[in-house]
Image (tube, rainbow, N blue to C red):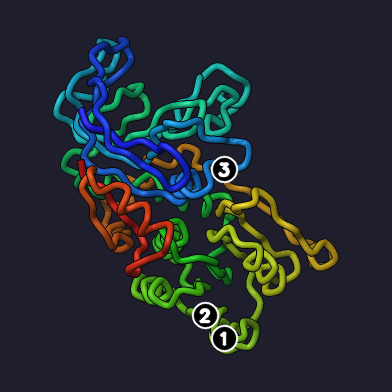
């Protein structure tokens, strides 16, 4: 079967690998249909690492995927051969204190698709996954939407953690796929006083199309005057989906005293510097978001109900053979790319 792997910084190759032939009783064999290119994949592509997670070459990345069940173990009862499934890329042990306390996303023995020293990624034709990671979505959505569920669950989880009141004023920094996922979830929850701050005009326009109540480009506008003019002044909650230090600096400026800063983006340097004088005087709460926790079911229902349209964020499609072209485009923000999808 065909697969794609990283072989060095900004280097990828297409290769043949053996199709999986053996299943454990709790596993399923999946024919991959779509894979989304994620920002974390791009970090591994351009930098070879995310913080302490360092790629050992060659290595397959990719974790946002959907597929068709082609075989299953005897212990898998909630799936049938032929089912379309959305895949949670996080494999937790179910036994550690984190799992037993309802936090499988911070499992002490977690293994994640496309994460160095954990699991090879899904940029291939077939993968084997534990049955519990697979959510049947046949007749609910198509394979493209199913692959988009994983990044959307991060937005769902971030909004859940923020616990925004109905009248909260909210700003989202970054209108990439995660920022747009946060925006979609907020709008589905009727949190209409939500604006987006983004330095790329084409992404800002997309946020406006989805329904952001105000838009600011901090690269061309003075942030605070624009915020007072369009958003009514300081906000209750900021979601940062950019991972940029400048966004964190601006977030502390525009938050009201007692506000919440929700950190979703991944900083390239794996660290931020906070203005503690300002943060302390305003008594800002900081909330970190680690992937998602029990949000797939809600994400599926939101797509099923038509409250969100995940395909709005997709701008480009590539065959598996063209994966290196897709990664180059996303890494370079070329051709007005927002979300690139690879079909297998």
> Which label's residue is closer to the chain start, 2 or 3?
3
Which residue is at 55% across, 67% downward?
A: 173
Percent position (x, y) of residue 141?
21, 47
Residue 6 falls in image quadrant? top left
- Looking at the image, is mark 1 or mark 3 earlier in the sequence? 3
| Secondary structure found at label 3 | strand
Can residue 310 be seen here? The reply is yes
Which is more foreground, mark 2 or mark 3? Answer: 3
Identify which residue is drawn at 58% across, 61% down. Answer: 240
Q: Are marks 2 and 3 in contact (CB under 8 Å)?
A: no
* Residue on which the image places disc 1: 221
Relative depth, front residue between 81 and 338 = 338
* Viewer-nearest residue: 87 or 269: 269
C-alpha separation, residue under disc 1 versus residue under disc 2: 7 Å
Q: How far is the residue under mark 2 from the one under mark 3?
A: 29 Å
Q: Are marks 1 and 2 in contact (CB under 8 Å)?
A: yes
Which one is in front, 128 or 26? Answer: 128
Percent position (x, y) of residue 259?
Answer: 69, 64
Q: Which mark is residue 50?
A: 3
């Amino acid at each position: 079967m065909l697969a794609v792997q990283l072989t060095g910084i900004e280097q990828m190759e297409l290769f043949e690998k053996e199709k999986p032939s053996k299943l454990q009783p709790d596993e399923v064999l999946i024919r991959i249909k779509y894979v989304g290119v994620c920002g974390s994949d791009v970090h591994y592509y351009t930098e070879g690492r995310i913080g302490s997670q360092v790629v050992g070459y060659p290595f397959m990345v990719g974790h946002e995927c959907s597929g068709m069940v082609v075989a299953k173990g005897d212990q898998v009862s909630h799936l049938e051969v032929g089912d379309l499934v959305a895949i949670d890329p996080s494999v937790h042990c179910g036994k550690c204190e984190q799992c037993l306390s309802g936090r499988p996303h911070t499992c002490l023995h977690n293994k994640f698709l496309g994460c160095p020293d954990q699991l090879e990624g899904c940029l291939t034709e077939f993968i084997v996954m534990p049955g519990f990671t697979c959510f049947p979505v046949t007749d609910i959505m198509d394979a493209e939407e199913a692959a988009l569920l994983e990044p959307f669950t991060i937005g769902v989880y971030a909004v859940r953690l923020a616990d925004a009141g109905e009248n909260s004023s909210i700003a989202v920094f970054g209108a990439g796929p995660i920022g747009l996922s946060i925006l979609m979830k907020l709008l589905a929850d009727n949190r209409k006083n939500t604006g987006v701050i983004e330095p790329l005009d084409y992404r800002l326009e997309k946020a406006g199309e989805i329904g952001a109540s105000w838009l600011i480009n901090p690269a061309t506008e003075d942030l605070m005057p624009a915020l007072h003019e369009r958003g009514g002044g300081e906000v209750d909650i900021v979601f940062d989906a950019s991972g940029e230090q400048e966004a964190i600096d601006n977030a502390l400026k525009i938050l009201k005293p007692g506000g919440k800063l929700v950190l979703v983006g991944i900083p390239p340097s794996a660290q931020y510097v906070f203005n503690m004088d300002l943060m302390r005087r305003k008594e800002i709460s900081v909330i970190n978001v680690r992937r998602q926790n029990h949000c797939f079911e809600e994400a599926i229902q939101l797509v099923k109900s038509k409250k969100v349209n995940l395909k709005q964020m997709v701008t480009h499609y590539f065959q598996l053979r063209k994966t290196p072209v897709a990664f180059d485009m996303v890494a370079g923000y070329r051709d007005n790319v927002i979300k690139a999808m690879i079909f297998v």
